[in-house]
Amino acid sequence: MIRIAVAEDNAFLAKSIQDKIALFPTQLKFKFQAFNGKLFLEKLTEDPNVDVILMDIQMPEMDGIETTRFISERYPQIKVIMLTVLDDEESIFQAILAGANGYLLKDENPKML
């Protein structure tokens, strides 16, 4: 079972991602979600038992790149997949430099996720 946490500031998209995860109950487990990087790190500190993080790049208070950098330093065993609306090469490059393991477009179908 892969344990997944989500950092996404758009409530509609966060719910959509949770719904996609729920389609695979024997393979994926949703752990928690936060609307910004700062709150996400607080939740991760409380519950670091996560395998994969789906991370929005643009969030208030602390963006996904800065949050990813912190996670890759403190929790190197957790994989971070960036979520983006556009194929923004510069942001994706910066996220990879910060420690992200890859990226997905937010509108990916559930099976691709």
Image (spheres, rainbow, N blue to C red):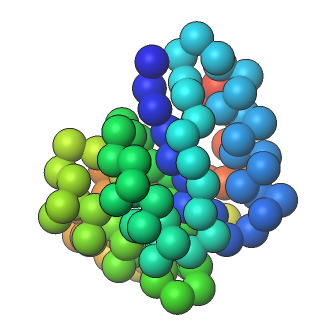
Quadrant of the drawing holding the C terminus: top right
* Above-or-below relation of 30 to 66: above
Query: Residue lying farthest bottom?
Result: 61
Report whether residue 62 is seen: yes
Which is more toward the observer, 70 or 113?
A: 70
Residue 82 coordinates in the image, percent (x, y): 47, 58
Q: Is residue 72 left or right of residue 85?
A: left
The residue lying at 39 percent from left, 55 percent from top is 46
Q: Is residue 34 left or right of residue 68?
A: right
Residue 3 coordinates in the image, percent (x, y): 46, 32
Which is more toward the observer, 61 or 55?
A: 61
The residue lying at 77 percent from left, 36 percent from top is 19
The residue lying at 52 percent from left, 88 percent from top is 61
Q: Quadrant of residue 65?
A: bottom left
* Above-or-below relation of 57 to 74: below
Query: Residue lying farthest top?
Result: 26
